[in-house]
Amino acid sequence: MAHFVKKVLTDIRSNRFLNLITIITISLSILVVSVFLLFFENASRVIESWNQGGRAMIYLNKEFSLDMLPKLKVKIKTLGDIDEIVYISKAQALDKLKKNMSSQSAFLKTLKENPLPDALEIRMRSYNSFEEVQKFAQSIKALEIVEDVEYGQGWLGRFLQIFNLFKITGYAMCTLFFLIALFITANTVRLAFYSRKLEIEIMRLVGATETFIKTPFYIEGLLQGFLGGTLGLIILLITYLMISSGMTQSLASYMYFDVRFLSVKTIVLIIVGSTFLGWFGCYLSLKQILK
Amino acid sequence: MNDKTNKNSIIRLFNVSKRFGGKLALKDITLDIEQGELIFISGPSGAGKSTLLKILYLAQKASEGQILIDGMNLARISSSKLPFLRRRFGMIFQDFKLIPNRTVFENVALVLEAAGEKPSFIRKKVMQVLRTTGMEKKFNTLPPTLSGGEQQRVAVARAVVGEPSVVFADEPTGSLDSKSAQAILDFLMGYHKKGATVLIVSHNLHLLERTVSGRNIEISEGRIKRIATIFQDKERKQ
Ligand SMILES: Nc1ncnc2c1ncn2[C@@H]1O[C@H](COP(=O)(O)OP(=O)(O)OP(=O)(O)O)[C@@H](O)[C@H]1O
Ligand SMILES: [Mg+2]
């Protein structure tokens, strides 16, 4: 092992420029990918908080009476995976309204009839996607007793359309940059291999196995992937810190959320991914050269 | 000298030919090399001596014919086992084949590293072999800065560092003055006396006069022209 590490270090030193280019290419690719991931992670968190984790209000029409409630609850529960259903009578709703609008409560007192509908507030247990909530809401809306269902569909839906578009673009960009990084890595390995062709031939002649010959290349690939991934994330972190220190206060107070850096899980995933990329580039290249 | 009743062949060739493009470099070579033998291979330039040695060393594949190694047919041995077979052989190439950007020490150490030896053992063993070949002072030098004779000695050190049971030497004294040539030859003879099989390619027939036993294989135009014990050669001269 010590032999391989020594070998890799001397190889990297003798091919400094090539290695630097490879690491920078990988780090830029990782940067693009992680910018998207940063965006997705924050956007998903915001969407979820706005949507309150799958919360919806069901407004019932005039035909509703309290004795229908148990049956209705059972019915709704068959339509989706519901965590809880809270009944809010129109009287409760009016009380709440009066409390919130104490100065105008005089106006509310003039009302002969309570104009508010009875409502059910529900929370879904497994809230995975907006689409799921949407489908669930439609099936509830189809019930006769239901007047309307509110789950932030209007502007949130539009936002989600844009978000999904971003997501597709993001996937495409990530794939593109992954392929670029893979191509560059594979090419670096190929150049390194040909620059050491004589050495490899001699190694074979003195009884070196193919594993012995290939191992330094794999270590180099893994190292390049790891360093490239780490460098990409460091660049992202520095940029993030610079931007967020200047913007957080003003922006966060406007938008009711803070931009958070990537989760530990995602960071580990990115580094593992880029290390794999280095390995895979090496694998493809050696497979092509040696067969 | 050759105890025919107790044959212990290491390498046997049966009707081996080697073709480069349309040109036959070796034709119909049948040869039996025994454990502990000393063999000279002589013949004019272009006769096919290096080619024969490379085929014996498994560095080149024969175009036709069978090769047995320790009784095993080479055709039946998977290519992944080849490195392990080759470790039992040491080779001094005519063009040395030293890695130019690795030091003398690293070039010699490579054999042991490839065999998976421990670094402490490698350090000790390589320095010891470099001492016996007179190259220990230049262990940290790059081969291109060495003289031809010095490179030759590094090549010899690399060939024997793994203590192979067979050593192939292609013109090991080719570019040397007579004193250095004698030193290398003495070294190889010493290695042979320890029980190793040694094959030396040379068109310098003076080498034969300095040895007491062994076989001389004369090659001409890719064919074995004559196999003779060196003892017989001497008798004939008298
Ligand atoms: N790799 C090769 N490709 C094509 N032809 C080759 C190759 N190697 C050897 N030959 C040819 O095979 C013939 C024998 O070559 P070889 O090197 O074995 O000769 P030799 O007896 O070692 O000569 P010398 O004494 O000059 O070293 C020559 O005609 C040579 O041109
Ligand atoms: Mg030759």
Image: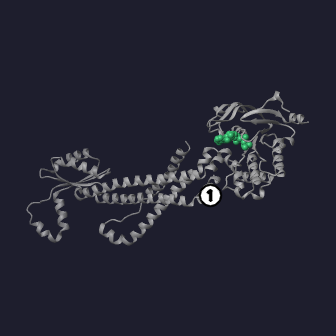
Answer left or right for B209 relative to B223. Answer: right
Classed neighbour count for the residue bearing mark 1: other residues with Cα under 10 Å, few (<14), some (14–19), many (≥20)? few
**Quarter of the rendering occupied by the N terminus of chain B:** top right
Q: Image quarter for residue A264?
A: bottom left
Question: Residue A169: x percent and y percent?
Answer: 34, 55
Q: Nearer the viewer, residue A155 or B39?
A: B39
In the rendered image, which quarter contains the C terminus of chain B?
Answer: top right
Q: Can residue B50 be seen in this view?
A: no
> Is B191 on the left-hand or right-hand side of A5?
right
Left or right: B202, with A269 as reference point: right
Q: Name the residue under label 1.
A: A10
Amino acid at dot 1:
Thr
Residue A21: image location, x then y, percent: 51, 60
Percent position (x, y) of residue A177? 42, 55
Colour setting? one colour
Report the residue that reaches farthest toward the top: B5
Q: Is mark 1 on a helix, strand or loop?
A: helix
State the residue at coordinates (82%, 28%).
B4
Residue at image coords 37%, 53%? A172
